[in-house]
Image: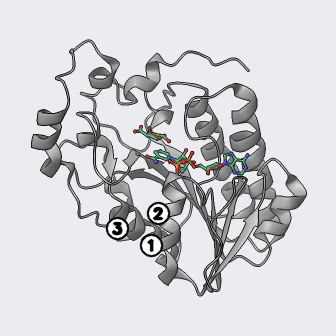
């Protein structure tokens, strides 16, 4: 791999991955619509709005692989979601089609299935139950990626990330946590695989309290190592015990199910 593109590189996850994915390619192209820190010698920085088709076309040119983190990452007014996650996704896939179909890791989300209760164990084939417009936009992204695979052979890993952060912060994240290191090893596995296709991947660490079954992607050779359980005592000590009627402990999407439809 010569050049890896990371979109959303100014964001929470992107700014961590910028430092942790350097061994994947000699050149890392970083992009966001927000300002990026100045490039290191192995980096290229490109400010680009995903809603701008011509700019996205130029952005993807010359890249052999894409970690697509860019877009709206929480519940927001539909106009914002439309630009980043709907139009932005279409622009990315059209740009990829015109530029040699680099393999894509698409940062989808657990909010595609957020209305499932926490006592259900899910396989990758379960019907969508999105918990807001944000979740719906990621269902669109997964469907779009699937169509580009069926029609054009474009390969994508549809990674339904749980909660990717330094450590789990509440009871729900004992199930949804994905450590940064496990995300890195997932990215490595996705770009190492000789053939990828377009699988759904549950993006969670090896949590004792996990809800999601990744047995369908054993062939990928991804073996998450971290386990949120080691933080249970800390969470018990630092967070109030949730009421059993709280969405945080009822639904897999947690408090996202309580979000209203945000108006512009
Ligand atoms: P974030 O909100 O911190 O970063 C997203 C970045 O995308 C931001 O820097 C933002 O400026 C950029 N962006 C938004 N709209 C854009 C547009 N129209 N054009 C260009 N750039 C745009 O989110 P975070 O936490 O870093 O997440 C990264 C990705 O992973 C997102 O796609 C999110 O949906 C997904 N994800 C993250 C999870 C997590 O636990 N961090 C969980 C599930 C999914
Ligand atoms: C997401 O999709 C969000 O992008 C992230 O900020 C977290 O809230 C995460 O899901 C989660 O469900 O914890």
Observer-nearest of 259 and 123: 259
Is label 1 in contact with label 2 (beta carbons under 8 Å)? yes
Residue that protrudes farthest toward the front in the picture: 38
- Crowdedness near tag 2: few (<14), some (14–19) or many (≥20) residues, C-alpha within 10 Å: some
Q: In the figure, 264 relative to 220: above or below?
A: above
Q: In the figure, 237 relative to 8: above or below?
A: above
- Label ID, residue 16: 2
* Residue drawn at point x = 34 percent, y = 24 percent: 251
**On the picture, is 80 further left or further right than 160?**
right
- Label ID, residue 20: 1
Residue bearing mark 3? 222
Q: What separation in Å lies between label 2 and label 3 (alpha carbons)?
A: 20 Å
> Dot 1: what SS?
helix
Q: In the figure, 228 relative to 127: above or below?
A: below
Q: Earlier in the sequence, mark 2 or mark 3?
A: 2
Observer-nearest of 129 and 22: 22
Q: For residue 256, what is the image quadrant?
A: top left
Query: Split into 4 quadrants, where in the image is the C terminus?
Result: top right
Where's residue 128, x and y in %? 50, 31
Name the mark nearer the viewer: 1 or 3: 1
Question: Is residue 115 at all visible to an observer of this figure?
Answer: no
Where's residue 250, x and y in %? 29, 21
Residue that protrudes farthest toward the top in the picture: 245
């Amino acid at each position: 791999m010569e050049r890896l593109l990371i979109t959303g590189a100014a964001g929470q996850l992107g700014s961590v991955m910028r430092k942790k994915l350097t061994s994947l390619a000699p050149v890392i192209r970083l992009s966001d619509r927000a300002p990026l820190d100045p490039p290191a010698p192995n980096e290229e920085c490109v400010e680009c709005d995903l809603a701008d088709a011509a700019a996205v076309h130029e952005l993807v040119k010359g890249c052999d692989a894409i970690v697509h983190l860019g877009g709206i990452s929480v519940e927001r007014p539909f106009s914002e979601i439309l630009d980043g996650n709907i139009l932005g996704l279409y622009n990315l896939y059209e740009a990829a089609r015109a530029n040699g179909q680099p393999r894509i890791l698409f940062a989808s989300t657990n909010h595609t299935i957020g209305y499932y209760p926490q006592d259900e164990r899910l396989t990758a084939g379960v019907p969508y139950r999105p918990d807001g417009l944000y979740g719906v936009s990621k269902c669109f992204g997964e469907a779009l990626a699937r169509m580009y695979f069926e029609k054009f052979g474009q390969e994508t890993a549809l990674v339904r990330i749980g909660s990717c952060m330094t450590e789990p912060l509440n009871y729900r994240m004992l199930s949804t946590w994905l450590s940064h290191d496990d995300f890195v090893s997932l990215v490595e596995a996705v770009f190492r695989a000789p053939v990828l296709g377009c699988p759904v991947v549950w993006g969670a660490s090896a949590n004792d309290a996990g809800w999601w079954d990744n047995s369908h992607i054993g062939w990928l050779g991804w073996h998450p190592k971290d386990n949120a359980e080691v933080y249970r005592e800390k969470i018990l000590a630092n967070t109030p015990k949730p009421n059993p009627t709280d969405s945080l402990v009822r639904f897999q999407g947690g408090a996202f199910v309580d979000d209203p439809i945000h108006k512009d």
